[in-house]
Image (tube, helix red, strand yellow):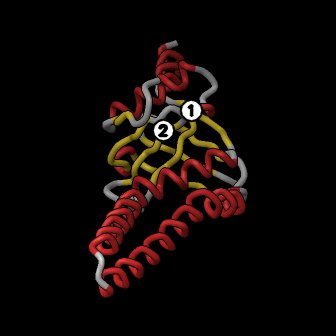
Amino acid sequence: MANDAGDEAALTNSVTIEYELTREEVTFWVRWHLVHVAHFRRQMVTVLIIVVVALVLILLGGRQNVIAGGILLGISLFTLVMLGLLYFLVVPRQTWNTSETDGPKVMEFTDEGVHSRTSNTHATYRWSTYSKALEMPQMYLLRHGNRKNLYTYVPKRSFRSSSDESTFRGLAAAHLTIEHQGPSR
């Protein structure tokens, strides 16, 4: 009997999820990564500043200013178009092709860490592998150490119940800081 109670307590401190990423999730994830990790916003702001400088040069007049401004403006507008194509066209098409490789993913969260497996991989990570968790309206992201470009994706829809999600949040909060991003739940 005492052993059954111990087994039951162990079960309450773990949760298992299974999911396959949808096209929308993969596209969202890659776009989020571009904006927050790859400094896409910083690149866009830099290009917009160059556009303003180019326009000022053109408005100042003078042959050299107009030529320099025109060249800067042309380069900036070309860069904006390329960044826009990347964000709105290339990302959705390319990510869908690469997201179908592993099939369903099963993850188990326990007091010891995170166990993950697909048809091609099997990995176990201690909670100390992660530096923080980000909570967004549709997902959690577990950041691997100080590596800004490596996250474990945990879709909220993969939890079978609100109790499973609460167990996950409790496990994550016991080991990590959870930062909220986006609108509140």
Q: Specify whether 143 is left or right of 105.
A: left
In this rendering, is residue 121 above or below 76? above
Does the residue at mark 2 contact the one at mark 1 (Cβ under 8 Å)? yes
Q: Amino acid at mark 2?
A: Tyr
Q: Label 2's element? A: strand
Mark 1 surroundings: few (<14), some (14-19) or many (≥20) residues within 10 A: some
- Residue tagged 2: 140
Residue at left 55%, top 61%?
A: 84
In this rendering, is residue 184 above or below 42? above
Residue at left 72%, top 57%?
A: 100
In this rendering, is residue 129 above or below 72? above
Q: Position of residue 104 (x, y in %)?
A: 70, 47
Mark 2 surroundings: few (<14), some (14-19) or many (≥20) residues within 10 A: many
Q: Which mark is residue 57?
A: none
User: Which label's residue is closer to the chain start, 2 or 1?
Assistant: 2
Viewer can see residue 101: no
- Residue tagged 1: 156
Q: Residue furthest bottom?
A: 64
